[in-house]
Image (tube, helix red, strand yellow):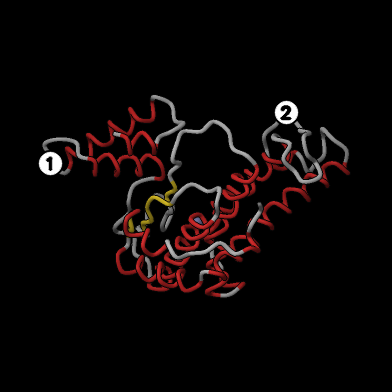
Protein backbone atom coordinates (compact mmCIF):
# COMPACT_ATOMS: atom_id res chain seq x y z
CA UNK A 1 0.00 0.00 0.00
CA UNK A 2 2.85 2.36 0.81
CA UNK A 3 4.39 1.84 -2.62
CA UNK A 4 1.04 2.42 -4.35
CA UNK A 5 0.43 5.51 -2.23
CA UNK A 6 3.81 6.92 -3.32
CA UNK A 7 3.07 6.26 -6.98
CA UNK A 8 -0.28 8.01 -6.84
CA UNK A 9 0.88 11.01 -4.80
CA UNK A 10 -0.97 14.11 -5.92
CA UNK A 11 -3.82 12.24 -7.59
CA UNK A 12 -7.47 12.53 -6.63
CA UNK A 13 -9.35 9.83 -4.72
CA UNK A 14 -10.91 8.61 -7.96
CA UNK A 15 -7.52 7.52 -9.36
CA UNK A 16 -6.67 4.94 -6.68
CA UNK A 17 -10.30 3.76 -6.90
CA UNK A 18 -9.91 3.29 -10.63
CA UNK A 19 -6.57 1.48 -10.14
CA UNK A 20 -8.09 -0.83 -7.51
CA UNK A 21 -10.94 -1.61 -9.88
CA UNK A 22 -8.52 -2.38 -12.75
CA UNK A 23 -6.46 -4.54 -10.38
CA UNK A 24 -9.56 -6.56 -9.48
CA UNK A 25 -10.26 -7.10 -13.18
CA UNK A 26 -6.65 -8.16 -13.80
CA UNK A 27 -6.73 -10.53 -10.82
CA UNK A 28 -10.00 -12.09 -11.99
CA UNK A 29 -8.69 -12.48 -15.52
CA UNK A 30 -5.62 -14.30 -14.21
CA UNK A 31 -7.81 -16.43 -11.89
CA UNK A 32 -6.05 -15.12 -8.78
CA UNK A 33 -7.88 -15.71 -5.48
CA UNK A 34 -6.91 -12.27 -4.21
CA UNK A 35 -5.55 -9.01 -5.62
CA UNK A 36 -1.76 -9.13 -5.46
CA UNK A 37 0.75 -6.32 -5.46
CA UNK A 38 1.64 -7.37 -9.00
CA UNK A 39 -1.99 -6.88 -10.08
CA UNK A 40 -1.96 -3.42 -8.49
CA UNK A 41 1.31 -2.47 -10.20
CA UNK A 42 0.01 -3.66 -13.55
CA UNK A 43 -3.24 -1.72 -12.98
CA UNK A 44 -1.34 1.43 -12.05
CA UNK A 45 0.79 1.30 -15.20
CA UNK A 46 -2.23 0.46 -17.35
CA UNK A 47 -4.14 3.46 -15.98
CA UNK A 48 -1.09 5.76 -16.24
CA UNK A 49 0.05 4.99 -19.80
CA UNK A 50 -2.07 2.22 -21.29
CA UNK A 51 -2.12 -1.56 -21.58
CA UNK A 52 0.99 -3.63 -22.23
CA UNK A 53 1.15 -4.65 -25.87
CA UNK A 54 3.08 -7.92 -25.75
CA UNK A 55 2.03 -8.70 -29.32
CA UNK A 56 3.65 -5.52 -30.66
CA UNK A 57 6.84 -6.61 -32.37
CA UNK A 58 9.79 -4.25 -32.29
CA UNK A 59 12.70 -5.03 -34.56
CA UNK A 60 16.20 -5.38 -33.11
CA UNK A 61 17.24 -1.83 -34.01
CA UNK A 62 14.07 -0.34 -32.49
CA UNK A 63 14.63 -2.37 -29.32
CA UNK A 64 18.20 -1.14 -29.12
CA UNK A 65 17.14 2.48 -29.65
CA UNK A 66 14.44 2.10 -26.96
CA UNK A 67 16.96 0.58 -24.55
CA UNK A 68 19.40 3.47 -25.03
CA UNK A 69 16.58 6.02 -24.92
CA UNK A 70 15.25 4.78 -21.56
CA UNK A 71 18.78 4.27 -20.20
CA UNK A 72 19.37 7.93 -21.06
CA UNK A 73 16.35 9.07 -19.01
CA UNK A 74 17.35 6.83 -16.12
CA UNK A 75 21.00 7.93 -15.94
CA UNK A 76 20.27 11.65 -16.27
CA UNK A 77 17.49 11.39 -13.68
CA UNK A 78 19.70 9.39 -11.34
CA UNK A 79 22.70 11.70 -11.55
CA UNK A 80 20.96 15.09 -11.29
CA UNK A 81 20.86 16.17 -7.65
CA UNK A 82 17.33 17.63 -7.63
CA UNK A 83 15.59 14.84 -9.54
CA UNK A 84 13.44 12.06 -8.06
CA UNK A 85 14.99 8.57 -7.80
CA UNK A 86 14.56 6.08 -10.67
CA UNK A 87 12.06 3.42 -9.68
CA UNK A 88 11.71 1.05 -12.63
CA UNK A 89 12.59 0.84 -16.33
CA UNK A 90 10.63 -1.54 -18.59
CA UNK A 91 11.25 -1.57 -22.34
CA UNK A 92 7.99 -3.33 -23.13
CA UNK A 93 5.54 -1.57 -25.47
CA UNK A 94 2.68 -0.13 -23.43
CA UNK A 95 0.03 2.29 -24.65
CA UNK A 96 1.75 4.42 -27.26
CA UNK A 97 5.22 4.03 -25.77
CA UNK A 98 7.98 1.51 -26.49
CA UNK A 99 9.38 1.86 -22.99
CA UNK A 100 9.17 4.06 -19.97
CA UNK A 101 11.35 5.25 -17.10
CA UNK A 102 9.45 5.57 -13.84
CA UNK A 103 10.63 8.09 -11.29
CA UNK A 104 9.14 8.10 -7.80
CA UNK A 105 9.10 11.18 -5.61
CA UNK A 106 10.36 10.20 -2.14
CA UNK A 107 7.59 12.30 -0.58
CA UNK A 108 4.39 14.08 -1.57
CA UNK A 109 5.35 17.64 -2.44
CA UNK A 110 3.29 20.69 -3.28
CA UNK A 111 5.97 23.00 -4.65
CA UNK A 112 9.01 22.67 -6.86
CA UNK A 113 11.87 25.13 -7.22
CA UNK A 114 13.74 26.11 -10.38
CA UNK A 115 16.59 23.63 -9.79
CA UNK A 116 14.09 20.78 -9.50
CA UNK A 117 12.13 21.85 -12.58
CA UNK A 118 15.31 22.22 -14.62
CA UNK A 119 16.27 18.69 -13.58
CA UNK A 120 12.85 17.47 -14.74
CA UNK A 121 13.49 19.14 -18.11
CA UNK A 122 16.99 17.64 -18.42
CA UNK A 123 15.91 14.11 -17.54
CA UNK A 124 13.07 14.40 -20.06
CA UNK A 125 15.72 15.24 -22.67
CA UNK A 126 17.83 12.24 -21.55
CA UNK A 127 16.12 9.90 -24.02
CA UNK A 128 16.76 11.91 -27.15
CA UNK A 129 20.22 12.90 -25.88
CA UNK A 130 21.15 9.21 -25.62
CA UNK A 131 19.80 8.49 -29.10
CA UNK A 132 21.83 11.35 -30.54
CA UNK A 133 24.99 10.36 -28.73
CA UNK A 134 24.85 6.69 -29.75
CA UNK A 135 23.18 6.68 -33.16
CA UNK A 136 24.04 10.14 -34.53
CA UNK A 137 22.46 13.58 -34.79
CA UNK A 138 19.97 12.82 -37.56
CA UNK A 139 19.31 9.21 -36.56
CA UNK A 140 17.15 10.36 -33.64
CA UNK A 141 13.58 9.02 -33.70
CA UNK A 142 9.98 10.02 -33.06
CA UNK A 143 10.27 8.04 -29.81
CA UNK A 144 11.02 11.34 -28.08
CA UNK A 145 7.89 13.17 -29.22
CA UNK A 146 6.04 13.06 -25.91
CA UNK A 147 9.23 13.97 -24.01
CA UNK A 148 9.67 17.03 -26.22
CA UNK A 149 6.03 17.98 -25.77
CA UNK A 150 6.44 17.75 -21.99
CA UNK A 151 9.57 19.90 -22.15
CA UNK A 152 7.78 22.51 -24.27
CA UNK A 153 4.80 22.62 -21.89
CA UNK A 154 6.84 22.74 -18.71
CA UNK A 155 9.32 25.35 -19.92
CA UNK A 156 6.46 27.48 -21.21
CA UNK A 157 4.67 27.30 -17.89
CA UNK A 158 7.90 28.16 -16.04
CA UNK A 159 8.27 31.33 -18.11
CA UNK A 160 4.66 32.39 -18.59
CA UNK A 161 2.97 31.21 -15.39
CA UNK A 162 5.67 30.93 -12.75
CA UNK A 163 7.93 33.92 -13.35
CA UNK A 164 10.95 31.61 -13.68
CA UNK A 165 12.65 32.91 -16.83
CA UNK A 166 16.24 34.12 -16.58
CA UNK A 167 15.44 37.69 -17.73
CA UNK A 168 11.66 37.55 -17.40
CA UNK A 169 11.87 36.78 -13.67
CA UNK A 170 9.07 37.36 -11.17
CA UNK A 171 6.67 38.52 -13.83
CA UNK A 172 3.89 36.38 -15.31
CA UNK A 173 1.91 36.57 -18.54
CA UNK A 174 -1.60 35.25 -17.91
CA UNK A 175 -3.39 34.12 -21.01
CA UNK A 176 -7.05 33.84 -21.87
CA UNK A 177 -6.53 30.76 -23.97
CA UNK A 178 -4.20 27.89 -23.08
CA UNK A 179 -3.21 27.10 -26.69
CA UNK A 180 0.54 27.03 -27.17
CA UNK A 181 0.59 29.48 -30.07
CA UNK A 182 -1.44 32.22 -28.43
CA UNK A 183 1.76 33.70 -27.02
CA UNK A 184 3.51 33.88 -30.36
CA UNK A 185 0.59 35.63 -32.02
CA UNK A 186 1.26 38.26 -29.39
CA UNK A 187 -2.32 39.17 -28.49
CA UNK A 188 -1.96 39.97 -24.77
CA UNK A 189 1.52 41.52 -24.99
CA UNK A 190 3.81 43.39 -27.33
CA UNK A 191 5.65 41.64 -30.15
CA UNK A 192 8.83 42.29 -28.24
CA UNK A 193 7.59 40.53 -25.11
CA UNK A 194 6.31 37.59 -27.15
CA UNK A 195 9.75 37.29 -28.68
CA UNK A 196 11.44 37.46 -25.27
CA UNK A 197 9.13 34.70 -23.99
CA UNK A 198 9.99 32.53 -26.98
CA UNK A 199 13.68 33.02 -26.36
CA UNK A 200 13.34 32.13 -22.67
CA UNK A 201 11.43 28.94 -23.51
CA UNK A 202 14.01 27.97 -26.10
CA UNK A 203 16.86 28.69 -23.70
CA UNK A 204 15.33 26.35 -21.10
CA UNK A 205 14.99 23.48 -23.61
CA UNK A 206 18.49 24.03 -24.93
CA UNK A 207 19.99 24.10 -21.47
CA UNK A 208 18.12 20.89 -20.61
CA UNK A 209 19.46 19.13 -23.73
CA UNK A 210 23.01 20.34 -23.09
CA UNK A 211 22.93 19.15 -19.48
CA UNK A 212 21.48 15.76 -20.47
CA UNK A 213 24.22 15.27 -23.07
CA UNK A 214 26.96 16.32 -20.65
CA UNK A 215 25.75 13.77 -18.10
CA UNK A 216 25.58 10.98 -20.67
CA UNK A 217 28.96 11.79 -22.20
CA UNK A 218 30.50 11.61 -18.72
CA UNK A 219 28.83 8.23 -18.11
CA UNK A 220 28.96 6.53 -21.47
CA UNK A 221 30.21 3.17 -20.16
CA UNK A 222 27.24 3.05 -17.77
CA UNK A 223 24.89 4.02 -20.59
CA UNK A 224 26.15 1.04 -22.64
CA UNK A 225 25.91 -1.28 -19.64
CA UNK A 226 22.37 -0.20 -18.72
CA UNK A 227 21.13 -0.45 -22.33
CA UNK A 228 22.66 -3.96 -22.52
CA UNK A 229 20.98 -5.08 -19.31
CA UNK A 230 17.63 -3.69 -20.49
CA UNK A 231 17.93 -5.60 -23.77
CA UNK A 232 18.70 -8.76 -21.78
CA UNK A 233 16.00 -8.45 -19.10
CA UNK A 234 13.36 -6.06 -20.58
CA UNK A 235 12.49 -4.69 -17.13
CA UNK A 236 14.85 -3.50 -14.41
CA UNK A 237 13.55 -2.72 -10.94
CA UNK A 238 15.10 -0.37 -8.40
CA UNK A 239 17.28 -3.06 -6.80
CA UNK A 240 18.65 -4.14 -10.20
CA UNK A 241 19.21 -0.55 -11.35
CA UNK A 242 21.07 0.43 -8.20
CA UNK A 243 24.33 -1.52 -8.79
CA UNK A 244 24.55 -0.25 -12.38
CA UNK A 245 23.72 3.38 -11.60
CA UNK A 246 25.65 3.78 -8.38
CA UNK A 247 28.99 4.57 -10.04
CA UNK A 248 27.47 7.21 -12.35
CA UNK A 249 28.91 10.65 -11.70
CA UNK A 250 27.72 14.23 -12.08
CA UNK A 251 29.99 16.27 -14.40
CA UNK A 252 30.71 19.89 -13.36
CA UNK A 253 29.45 21.04 -16.76
CA UNK A 254 25.89 19.93 -15.88
CA UNK A 255 25.83 21.46 -12.40
CA UNK A 256 23.46 24.34 -11.65
CA UNK A 257 24.52 24.91 -8.07
ZN1 LIG B 1 11.51 9.28 -23.55
- Report which quarter residue 7 is drawn in: top left
Residue 176 vs 238, above or below: the answer is: above
Picture disc at residue 145: none
Answer yes or no: disc 1 within 8 Å of ligand 1. no
Answer yes or no: disc 2 within 8 Å of ligand 1. no
Earlier in the chain: of badge 2 and badge 1, it is: 1
In depth, the one of 203 and 91 nearer the eye is: 203
Residue 159 vs 122, above or below: the answer is: above
Residue at the spot x=32%, y=51% of the render?
A: 52
Residue at the spot x=73%, y=53% of the render?
A: 202
In depth, the one of 210 and 44 nearer the eye is: 210
Q: In this view of the protein, can residue 150 be seen by the observer?
A: yes
Mark 1 burial class by Cα count in 10 Å: few <14, some 14-19, many 20+? few
Q: CA distance from mark 2 to mark 1?
A: 51 Å
Residue at the spot x=56%, y=72% of the render?
A: 133
Across and down, in percent, residue 77 comes to: 51, 54
Q: Secondary structure at mark 2?
A: loop
Q: Are marks 2 and 1 in contact (CB under 8 Å)?
A: no
Residue at the spot x=38%, y=73% of the render?
A: 60
Across and down, in percent, residue 59 comes to: 38, 70
Residue 92 left/right relative to 210: left
The residue that disc 2 covers is 176
The residue that disc 1 covers is 31
Amino acid sequence: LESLAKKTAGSSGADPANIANEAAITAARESHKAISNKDLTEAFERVAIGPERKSKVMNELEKKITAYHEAGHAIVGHVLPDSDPVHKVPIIPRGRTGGVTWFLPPEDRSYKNIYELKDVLARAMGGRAAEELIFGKDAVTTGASSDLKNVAELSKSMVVEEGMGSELRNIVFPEESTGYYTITTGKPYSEKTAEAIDLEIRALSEEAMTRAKEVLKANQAILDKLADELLKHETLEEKELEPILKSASMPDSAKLH
